[in-house]
Image (cartoon, rainbow, N blue to C red):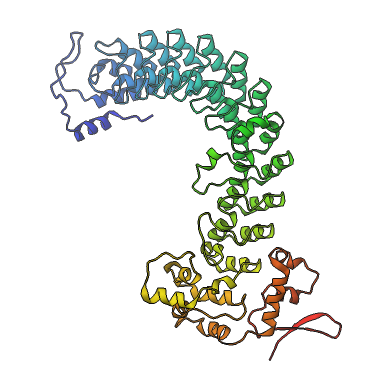
């Protein structure tokens, strides 16, 4: 509560240009002092001191102000001062402050039961709310003051009156998990299923906050367990969302429907999976309808993967959840990339560990219209790229509707580590150097705007976003190809770059026999077997040689030692 002192109110009025009435107060005919000006601050000071006699003398001095002596006395719990002020002529028991607080409201907020009783006996209206339409009864429940609640109800307070958001006193008592308050309110005929502006009932509010005792009492007294909010959420849905396991158990014991979907089509199992509540998922799995899950158009596995809840993913998979289940067409169309699998959701959320769980469980990386590999390459996530390739992702994947004359995955690659990974797993580097030189020259000199059937590598690498690192990319690609000739556009692009001498050496003379042999072996292995080359029973140097991790053509050469084992030695 925001409370202003009298002096602060005076300052506020002066700031706003409001003029005070400076005419002198007339003395009463009851033997008061002669006419004179009386400062209201003196009355407030007297209230704070508990000087009842002085308060009685100055009782009406500040009644014209918004913050009166009665407000101060009620807030401070000065019972005798309240009594004295109420006896004075012209004092209004229901006068409001700028925040629309009555003396009764302030007494309730200050937990001053004697002041509450005196004000009610003096005729204070128990249903006058503050600026937020919160009544003294609502505030008494907020304070968990059972004495104030009983006094207000005995004085006729409206038990079902709502604040500006639609909350009732029972909502507040439930949120406090105060069974005694709930009992008192229900005995006064509080509506047990009262709804706020969002159709939240006290039962749903109790479940949302895990107030198990209050929830049990409400259910025992007939509260609806399966009522829904305006969003279609039930008490069980809210308990699952916030991870209240005991509340979930209580609701299920009282026949809460685990297959009632929200307006978004999600079951409680979806919600628990999305928010990572493993124990609740275990409770819901045996009673969740597989048909209802299919009808929802989304698997709990999609949500668990998106939010990287690996334990829940394993739990769902062990329970028989299809690792390759697809989003419904309606849900898929809500995404620009038209994703369909849980694997894509994991990649999109950059959850490499979730990607690994799904792939090991048999997820197919080639189902989605836009390949997860392309997305992982664009994100620069080497781990996800490697996992996808190792589990069968097509390195030649292309986005829908795009035709290019080189591996499309390179268009989404912005990190050299990712490019190396792609090349190690069979990305066709040779296709980057197959554009026809005369076509490139013609495009360069004539500056033609005619659309070509395929986007050529030289066109892409010359684009502004790649111009700064073109030399490093081409140098890396040349390590995966044999004898090639660069087109004029690439030659012009590489002029005066630090890597130019290395590139010139690789393109101006025949490649070494060692390098060509490596390419031939890799070609014979094929893309699929290249993924498992590191698992071959070969010495480390040979594995590095086959994986193109030996550096340039001339620094190492494999040979057989005296014992017949393949080794690498330096060529000097």
Is residue 77 visible in this depiction of the protein?
Answer: no
- 386 or 156, which lies in front? 386
- Where is 57 relative to 45, above or below? above
Please state the horizontal and vertical placement of residue 562, each as a whole percent of the image: 85, 86
Q: Vertical placement of 107 versus 314: above or below?
A: above
Which residue is the extreme one toward the bottom?
572
Residue appearing at x 72%, y 49% in the figure: 361
**Side (left or right) of 22 relative to 288:** left
**Residue under the point 54% across and 62% down:** 408
7 to 306, vertically: above or below: above
Residue at the image point whose x is 41% and y is 73% from the top:
443
Q: Give how far across and how far down residue 374 sits, in percent.
A: 56, 58
Q: Nearer the viewer, residue 105 or 514?
A: 514
Res. 82 image quadrant: top left
Q: Quadrant of the N terminus?
A: top left
The residue closer to the viewer here, 294 or 349, is: 294
Which quadrant of the figure has residue 257? top right
Q: Locate residue 539 relative to residue 355 in the image: left or right.
A: right
Question: In this picture, is 536 found above or below 499?
Answer: above
Please tell me in which quadrant of the rendered image residue 395 appears.
Answer: bottom right
* For residue 373, side relative to residue 194 (left or right): right
> Quarter of the image containing the C terminus?
bottom right
């Amino acid at each position: 509560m925001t409370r202003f002192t009298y002096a602060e109110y005076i300052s506020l009025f002066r700031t706003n240009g409001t003029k005070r009435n400076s005419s002198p107060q007339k003395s009463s005919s009851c033997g008061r002092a002669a006419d004179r000006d009386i400062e209201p601050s003196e009355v407030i000071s007297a209230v704070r001191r508990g000087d009842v006699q002085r308060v009685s003398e100055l009782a009406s001095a500040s009644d014209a102000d918004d913050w009166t002596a009665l407000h101060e006395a009620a807030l401070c719990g000065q019972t005798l001062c309240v009594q004295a002020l109420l006896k004075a002529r012209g004092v209004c028991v229901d006068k409001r402050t700028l925040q629309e607080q009555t003396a009764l409201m302030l007494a309730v907020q200050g937990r001053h039961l004697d002041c509450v009783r005196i004000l009610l006996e003096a005729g204070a209206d128990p249903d006058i709310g503050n600026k937020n339409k919160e009544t003294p009864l609502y505030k008494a429940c907020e304070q968990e003051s059972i004495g104030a609640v009983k006094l207000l109800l005995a004085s006729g307070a409206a038990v079902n009156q709502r604040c500006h958001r639609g909350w009732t006193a029972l909502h507040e008592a439930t949120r406090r998990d105060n069974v005694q308050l709930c009992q008192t309110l229900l005995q006064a005929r509080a509506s047990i299923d009262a709804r706020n502006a969002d159709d939240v009932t006290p039962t749903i509010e109790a479940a949302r906050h895990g107030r198990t005792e209050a929830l049990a009492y409400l259910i025992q007294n007939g509260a609806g367990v399966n009522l829904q909010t305006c969003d279609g959420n039930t008490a069980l849905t809210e308990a699952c969302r916030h991870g209240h396991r005991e509340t979930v158990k209580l609701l299920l014991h009282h026949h809460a429907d685990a297959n009632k979907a929200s307006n978004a089509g999600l079951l409680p199992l979806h919600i628990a999976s999305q928010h990572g509540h493993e124990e609740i998922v275990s409770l819901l799995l045996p009673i969740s309808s597989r048909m209802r899950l299919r009808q929802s158009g989304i698997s709990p596995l999609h949500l668990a993967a998106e939010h990287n809840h690996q334990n829940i993913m394993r739990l769902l998979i062990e329970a028989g959840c299809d690792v390759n289940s697809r989003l419904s067409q309606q849900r898929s169309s809500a995404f620009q990339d038209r994703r369909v699998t849980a694997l894509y959701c994991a990649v999109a959320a950059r959850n490499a560990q979730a990607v690994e769980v799904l792939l090991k469980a048999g997820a197919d990386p080639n189902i989605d219209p836009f390949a997860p590999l392309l997305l992982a390459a664009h994100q620069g996530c080497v781990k996800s790229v490697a996992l996808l390739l190792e589990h069968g992702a097509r390195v030649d994947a292309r986005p829908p509707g795009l035709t290019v004359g080189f591996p499309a995955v390179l268009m989404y690659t912005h990190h050299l580590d990712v490019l190396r990974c792609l090349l190690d797993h069979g990305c066709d580097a040779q296709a980057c150097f197959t554009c026809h030189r005369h076509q490139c020259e013609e495009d360069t000199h004539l500056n033609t705007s005619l659309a070509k059937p395929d986007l050529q590598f030289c066109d892409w690498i010359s684009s502004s976003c790649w111009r700064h690192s073109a030399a490093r990319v081409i140098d890396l690609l040349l390590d995966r190809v044999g004898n090639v000739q660069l087109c004029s556009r690439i030659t012009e692009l590489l002029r005066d770059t630090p890597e130019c001498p290395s590139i010139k050496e690789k393109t101006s003379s025949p490649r070494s026999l060692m390098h060509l042999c490596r390419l031939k072996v890799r070609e014979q292995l094929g893309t699929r077997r290249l993924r498992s080359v590191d698992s071959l029973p070969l010495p480390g140097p040979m594995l590095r040689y086959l994986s193109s991790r030996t550096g340039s053509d001339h620094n190492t050469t494999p040979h057989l030692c005296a014992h017949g084992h393949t080794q690498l030695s330096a060529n000097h």
